[in-house]
């Protein structure tokens, strides 16, 4: 009887997770916005640009037409559904749950698609009218520019990118949808 696939994946990932925990950050993490009103943030966001990543760009996915939909749950957590079209044009969806980190003004979310693994989702830029958002990770290895509409006017996109640049993200890595 072999090792179940879930345990095998955990054993393979464990050394990487431990190494990541042992490595001190090279610089302070980016600052988040002061406050996110989760009721206003809920709903569907369209991805305008992102850093390439294995979740959206690996395994033949090459996601396009990407959206993220956030839903407040009665228990205080947030439901997350990410959708995109893969390289074959088929819709792919992934569901997750998230919670706001205490004392973060709801600007730092912990998201899990597969328990017990969580990712950091930090809102580092947010239009006052919630028309666009910039989301990154504390290690600056993930970055997304999101909009309430499928197309974003250039001035808004430039403003969003400048927020990320000001927080030390390598914005040259951004890939527009």
Image (cartoon, rainbow, N blue to C red):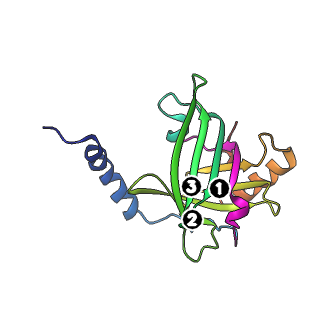
Left or right side of 129 for 29: left
Q: Nearer the viewer, mark 3 or mark 2?
A: 2
Looking at marks 3 and 1 on the same chain, the residue that comes earlier in the sequence is marked by 3
Residue 36: quadrant of the picture: bottom right
Residue, x 68% and y 57% (percent of image)? 42
Left or right side of 172 for 138: left
Looking at marks 3 and 2 on the same chain, the residue that comes earlier in the sequence is marked by 2
Q: Residue furthest bottom?
A: 103
Q: Position of residue 38 (x, y in %)?
A: 67, 64
Res 79 label: 3
For the residues labelled 1 and 2, say whether their Cβ atoms are less than 8 Å apart.
no
User: Which residue, given by chain and number where applicable, does mark 1 sit on?
Assistant: 135
Q: CA distance from mark 1 to mark 2?
A: 24 Å
Q: Which residues are magenta?
A: 34-53
Examine the rendered structure and indicate whether residue 143 appears above or below residue 72: above
Residue, x 54% and y 70% (percent of image)? 101
Res 74 label: 2
SS for dot 1: strand
Q: CA distance from mark 3 to mark 2?
A: 10 Å
Who is closer to the viewer here, 34 or 40?
40
Residue 67: quadrant of the picture: top right
Q: Position of residue 153 (x, y in %)?
A: 86, 44
């Amino acid at each position: 009887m072999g090792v179940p696939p879930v345990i095998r994946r955990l054993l393979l990932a464990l050394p990487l997770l431990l190494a990541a925990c042992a490595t001190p950050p090279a610089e302070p993490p980016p600052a988040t916005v002061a406050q996110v009103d989760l009721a206003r943030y809920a709903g569907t966001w369209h991805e305008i640009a992102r850093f390439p990543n294995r979740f959206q760009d690996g395994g033949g996915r090459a996601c396009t037409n990407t959206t993220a939909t956030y839903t407040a749950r009665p228990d205080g957590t947030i439901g997350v559904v990410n959708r995109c079209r893969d390289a074959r044009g088929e819709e792919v969806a992934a569901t997750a749950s998230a919670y706001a980190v205490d004392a973060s003004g709801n600007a730092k979310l912990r998201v899990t698609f597969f328990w017990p693994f969580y990712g950091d989702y930090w809102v580092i830029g947010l239009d006052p009218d919630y028309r666009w958002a910039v989301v990154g990770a504390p290690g600056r290895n993930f970055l997304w520019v999101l909009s309430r509409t499928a197309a974003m006017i250039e001035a808004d996109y430039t403003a969003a990118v400048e927020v990320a640049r000001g927080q030390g993200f390598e914005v040259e890595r951004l890939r527009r949808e």
